[in-house]
Image: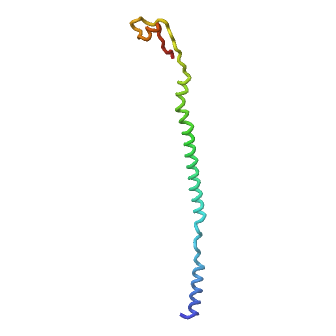
Amino acid sequence: MNIVDERDLRQQLDRVLDAIMPPDAPVKAAARKGKLIQAARSLGVVAGLAVVAGIGVGIPRLLNQPAREVSHARPTVMVEQRCGTAGERPAAELATGGCAWLKP
């Protein structure tokens, strides 16, 4: 192959390669997809934190609610000198001469 043939071949190849236009790099599509993935992750984290906060606030309220209602009740001790007959009273009551009970 001589120099004229090489130059001729190079010119032909240059024309063919100039005629072929490569496609654009998918940078915009990749960036858009990355933003969507990031938004989905952020939304997932926010939703998870909201659920944890809701559980953290709700569980103690549910657990403490019955305890509050019971803790406000104060029993009253009722004492009588004579209650029932001697055969019905326990020995401790017989010794003190009275009986006691809690009135709700």
Residue 88 percent across, percent down from the top left: 40, 8
**Residue ID at (55%, 42%):** 52
Please state which of residues 104 and 92 is positioned toward the viewer in this rendering: 92
The residue depicted at 44 percent of the width and 8 percent of the height is 95
Q: Is residue 3 above or below residue 55?
A: below
- Tally of numbered discs: 0
Image colouring: rainbow
The picture quadrant where one finds residue 30 is bottom right
Give the image location of residue 101, x and y in percent.
48, 14
Q: Quadrant of residue 91?
A: top left
Q: From this view, report whether residue 21 is shown above or below residue 68.
A: below
Q: Nearer the viewer, residue 52 or 76?
A: 76
Nearest to the observer: residue 42 or residue 2: 42
Q: Position of residue 66 (x, y in %)?
A: 52, 28
Q: Position of residue 98 (x, y in %)?
A: 47, 8
Residue located 55% across and 33% down the image: 61
> Is 28 drawn above or below residue 69 in the view shown?
below
Most extreme residue toward the left, as rendered?
87
